[in-house]
Image (cartoon, rainbow, N blue to C red):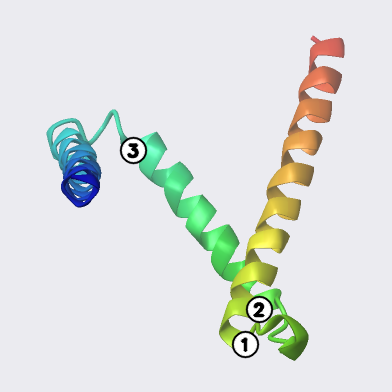
Amino acid sequence: MIDLALYLTYFLVIAAILLVLGFAVWFLTKNFKKSKNTLLGALSLVIIFIIAYALSSGEVYEKFQIGEGLSKLIGGSIITLYILFFGTIAAAIYSEIAKLFK
C-alpha cells in the first residue's frame, strides 16, 4: 500500500511540474510583451550565476567528498547569493536617498 501511495505522489508531483511549465510557456507565447520584464529578470539571474560560477574556485575537499564540479557549483551559488544580497541592500539605500531629494 505504501508503494502505491509513493508512486502516486511521484506521478502527481511530476504532473504538477509539467502543468506549471506548460502554462508558463503558453502564457509566454500568448502574452510576450507583458512577460518581457520577467524574461529579462530571469536572464539577468542566469547571467549573474554564470559570472559567479566562473569566479568560484574548484577546490577539492576530500574530507567532505566534494569534487571540483560540486565545489564550483556551491561556490558559484554562494557568490550569487552575495551579489544579490548586496545588490538588494544597495537598491534599498539608493531608493531611500532618492526619496529624500524628491
For the point 74% across and 86% down, which residue is it? 61
Q: Quadrant of residue 80?
A: bottom right
Residue 10 lies, in percent from the top left, at: 23, 49
Q: CA distance from mark 1 to mark 2?
A: 6 Å
Q: Which amino acid type is shown beneath numbered disc 3? A: Lys
Disc 1 vs disc 3: Cβ atoms closer than 8 Å?
no
Residue 36: which disc?
Answer: 3
* Camera-nearest label, 1 or 3: 1
Q: Secondary structure at mark 3?
A: helix
Q: Which amino acid type is shown beneath numbered disc 2? A: Ser
**Residue, disc 1:** 67
For the point 76% across and 22% down, which residue is it? 95
Q: Which amino acid type is shown beneath numbered disc 1? A: Gly
Q: Nearer the viewer, residue 76 or 3?
A: 3
Give the quadrant of the N terminus.
Answer: top left
Give the quadrant of the C terminus.
Answer: top right
